[in-house]
Image (cartoon, rainbow, N blue to C red):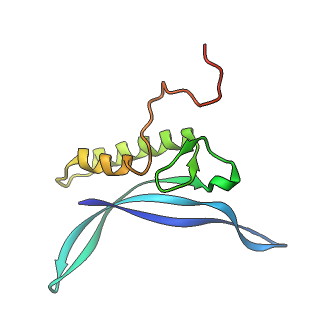
Amino acid sequence: MYVRWLKRELTRTTRIHGRFGIGGHALSAVLVENRRVAGGPRQRFVAHLATIRVWDTATGKGDLPMAGGGHAYRSDAWGFWECVSRKLDVIERAFDRDIVEAKIAGRVPRLLRAQPNPGTPGP
């Protein structure tokens, strides 16, 4: 099993302007496994792990640099990892959890609750 990343542009629709981009994308982590069907490899969906918003650097949004470009908010990263942990806990198939978490951490940094936001005054 391995992690596949799905990227979807964030858009907004209004009556006046129609559909337009808002300067970011949603990044989803999906767990898939390879199977051979009729002699060829096929990816089989196992579970959707979590989704996080990633903002383009030019928007000035987000305080956490992401691998692959862009920024996300720290609170979004915490929620992302909580969701990933819950989903991996309930998967009943055999897989190496450490490898899956390491692949995800390569794209979305794993944070501890004790890590402060940059720019916030300390105690």
Where does the C terminus fall, quadrant-wise? top right
Residue beneath the point at 36% across and 50% down:
104
95 relative to 28 in the view: left or right: left
With respect to residue 12, does 106 lie above or below?
Answer: above
Is residue 122 toward the left or the right of residue 109 in the image? right
Q: Residue 65 sits in which quadrant?
A: top right
In the image, residue 115 sits, relative to residue 6, either above or below, namely above
* Residue farthest along the top direction in this orientation: 123
Q: Position of residue 44 (x, y in %)?
A: 27, 70
Residue 114 drawn above or below residue 43: above
Tell me the residue at 85%/73% (across/down).
Answer: 16
Q: Nearer the viewer, residue 23 or 42?
A: 23
Q: Residue furthest toward the right?
A: 16
Location of the N terminus by quadrant is bottom left
Residue 75 position in % (x across, y down)? 56, 38
Relative horizontal placement of residue 14, taking residue 65 as reference (left or right): right
Find residue 5 and report its horizontal and vertical position in percent: 41, 62
Residue 116 rendering spot, x and y as whole percentages: 55, 27
Q: Nearer the viewer, residue 70 or 12?
A: 70
In the image: residue 82, left or right of residue 123? left
Q: How many marks?
A: 0
Q: Residue at x 20, y 49 (%)?
A: 96
